[in-house]
Image: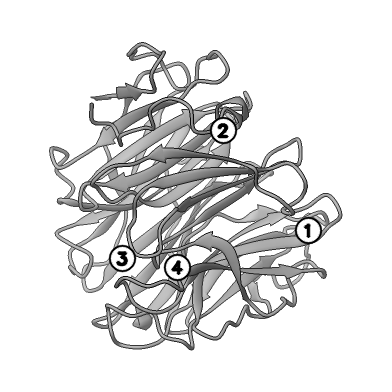
């Protein structure tokens, strides 16, 4: 078993208490979940998290020798409700001939657990296709793999959301180009829509695309009270220093079927993944790297007026490291959970906080990715 090691903001004390137990408001905990000592390969990136209807947390990531290694797998681990240790990671998806990556875990309202991931046919991610598995026993056993999309270059990154009409909307993206150090200008974000009530074809069907001048990928989407959908996307381009690197923003007024042209937002982006979730009170939480060319700091922002303003911002992790690919959810108890990777994509971290902590703003010490 793997015990959670916790790094806390100032004013708190270190504890191994379960992340599923009640906690005082205005507090941040960060746990180092898995690192190089876990023998699933040194590479552990990115991670995705779901809260199951049992109260358990279920974590997935893809591991192997490196980003472009062939012998990789998707691994799953569970933090049982009330426990303080994660179960040993078990491989739940694998291809003996091709690399797999970008695992996403999500439990639908009907309790079915969906695992989405990509399988890379060629040398770069632009050759990938999307596959999936489902579990009807709380992520304990899994179906055979099935294909969601055979389109080359289509990939997943963020969890689905449930729309007002009951349909599921899965954020995906189409990455083009063969340069691993450049996201091509023709790269676009789009979505797969699934109707669980449909009596006929129950396929995941593609929607319209988010297009922007320099390309965009990895959309994070939230639905507002008025029915509009807001998406923030990772920018295209390279990874070097720039003075013009911003998250790309778009919106939809027809349930994700069509999207406005992607425009630069007010948030910097170093060509890195972003997360956006809607809280149950309607407030929005955006998690992003507050830099145009570095994956540090990892910052949390709060909007209480439907994406018009974001006055509350606070660093979740900072310092000379890279904090990447945040994936977030609001648990049943109202707290916000975020998993992200650090230390050259070899360490998975798990942060827990609430809206009160974000509102406190820049007071106190930011999290350090599980290291003290």
Instruction: Provide the residue designation for mark 4.
Output: 131
At x 28% / y 31%, what residue is drawn?
370
Mark 1 neighbour density, 10 Å: few (under 14) some (14–19) many (20 or more): few
- Is label 1 in a helix, a strand or a loop? loop
Toward the right, the furthest residue is: 226
Badges 1 and 3: C-beta atoms under 8 Å apart? no
At horizontal 60% and vertical 74% (from top left) the residue drawn is 190
Residue at the image point whose x is 65% and y is 47% from the top? 310
Question: Does label 2 or label 1 sit earlier along the sequence?
Answer: 1
**Which residue corresponds to the image point at 76% horizontal and 71% vertical from the top-left?**
200
Mark 4 lies on a secondary structure that is: strand
Report the side of 111 relative to 73 (left or right).
right
Marks 4 and 2, how far apart at CA: 36 Å
Residue 358 is tagged as: 2
Above or below, comparing residue 335 to residue 175 in the picture = above
Q: Which residue is mark 1?
A: 197
State which mark lies toward you, 3 or 2.
2
Q: CA distance from mark 3 to mark 4?
A: 9 Å
Quickly name the residue at label 3: 100
């Amino acid at each position: 078993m793997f015990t959670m090691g916790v790094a806390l903001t100032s004013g708190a004390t270190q504890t191994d208490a379960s992340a599923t137990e009640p906690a005082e408001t205005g507090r941040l905990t960060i746990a180092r979940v898995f690192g190089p000592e876990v023998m699933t390969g040194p590479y552990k990136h990115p991670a995705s998290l779901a809260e199951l209807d049992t109260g358990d947390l279920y974590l997935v990531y893809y591991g192997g020798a490196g980003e472009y290694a062939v012998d990789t797998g998707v691994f799953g681990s569970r933090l049982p409700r009330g426990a303080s240790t994660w179960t040993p990671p078990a491989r739940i998806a694998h291809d003996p001939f091709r690399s797999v990556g970008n695992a996403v875990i999500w439990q639908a309202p009907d309790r079915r657990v969906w695992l989405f991931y990509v399988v890379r046919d060629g040398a770069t991610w632009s050759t990938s296709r999307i596959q999936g598995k489902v579990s009807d026993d709380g992520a304990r056993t899994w179906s055979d793999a099935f294909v969601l999309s055979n389109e080359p270059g289509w990939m997943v990154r963020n969890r689905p959301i449930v729309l007002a009409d009951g349909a599921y909307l899965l954020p995906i993206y189409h990455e083009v180009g063969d340069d691993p150090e450049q996201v091509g200008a023709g790269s676009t974000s789009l979505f797969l829509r699934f109707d669980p009530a449909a009596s006929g074809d129950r396929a995941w069907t593609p929607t319209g695309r988010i297009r922007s001048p320099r390309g965009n990928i990895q959309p994070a989407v939230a639905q507002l009270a008025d029915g509009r959908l807001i998406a923030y996307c990772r920018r295209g381009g390279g990874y070097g220093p720039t003075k013009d690197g911003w998250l790309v923003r778009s919106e939809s007024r027809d349930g994700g079927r069509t999207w406005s042209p992607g425009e630069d937002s007010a948030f910097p982006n170093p060509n890195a993944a972003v997360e956006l979730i809607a809280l149950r009170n309607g407030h929005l939480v955006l998690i992003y790297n507050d830099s145009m060319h570095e994956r540090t700091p990892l910052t949390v922002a709060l909007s209480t007026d439907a994406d018009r303003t974001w006055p509350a911002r606070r660093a979740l992790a900072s310092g000379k490291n890279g904090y990447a690919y945040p994936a977030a959810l609001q648990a049943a108890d109202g707290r916000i959970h975020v998993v992200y990777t650090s230390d050259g994509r070899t360490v998975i971290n798990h942060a827990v906080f609430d809206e009160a902590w974000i509102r406190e703003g820049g007071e106190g010490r930011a999290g350090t990715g599980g290291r003290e």
